[in-house]
Image (cartoon, rainbow, N blue to C red):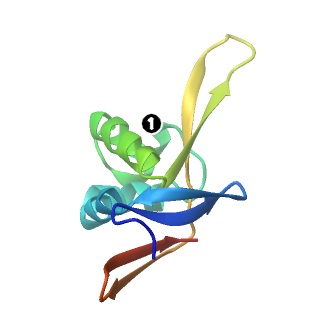
Amino acid sequence: MSTPDREPRRVDGRESTLPRSDALTLLASDTGIELLQAAGRPGTACELRDRSGVPLSTVYREASKLVEAGLLEETVRVDVDNGRHASVYERAVDSLTVSITDDGVDIRAE
């Protein structure tokens, strides 16, 4: 069993952790689910807003939390013609399994 606050997961071939309470809180909100669905293919905050209908300020706030929880990956896209850059978000996991055990809640990201 893993530590009480974090569950093992693999990111880029290495083991990392997913904050259990963060993941459950984000997944319990409609906004978190809508953004994860919208991030099924890479997109900027504006693109996620357009796909999900979530207000842009909320997209920025919630995307940051989803990145911190390990559910979204953030990369930077640079426009070489004008030097502008934008964060691009993409779902970091394909699935999550939540299990309730005698020792507590277990979350596995795949």
x and y, in percent, of residue 100 in the image: 32, 86
Farthest residue, direction top: 82
Q: In terms of depth relative to the viewer, which is nearer, 50 or 100?
A: 100
x and y, in percent, of residue 12 in the image: 70, 54
Query: Compared with residue 54, is residue 33 higher up or lower down, i.e. above or below?
Result: below
Q: Amino acid at mark 1?
A: Cys
Query: Compared with residue 108, is residue 12 higher up or lower down, i.e. above or below?
Result: above
Q: In terms of depth relative to the viewer, which is nearer, 18 or 34?
A: 18
Q: In terms of depth relative to the viewer, which is nearer, 39 or 4?
A: 4
Horizontal side, residue 24 vs residue 14: left or right: left
Q: Which residue is mark 1?
A: 46
x and y, in percent, of residue 35 in the image: 40, 54
Location of the C terminus by quadrant is bottom right
Residue at left 68%, top 10%? 82
Residue at left 75%, top 16%? 80
x and y, in percent, of residue 33 in the image: 36, 63
For the residue labelled by badge 1, is the local secondary structure a helix, a strand or a loop?
helix
Q: In terms of depth relative to the viewer, which is nearer, 62 or 79?
A: 62
Query: Compared with residue 86, is residue 62 higher up or lower down, i.e. above or below?
Result: below
**Total numbered badges shown on the rendered structure:** 1
Residue at left 31%, top 38%? 61
Query: Compared with residue 76, is residue 82 higher up or lower down, i.e. above or below?
Result: above
Location of the N terminus by quadrant is bottom left
Horizontal side, residue 34 vs residue 30: left or right: right
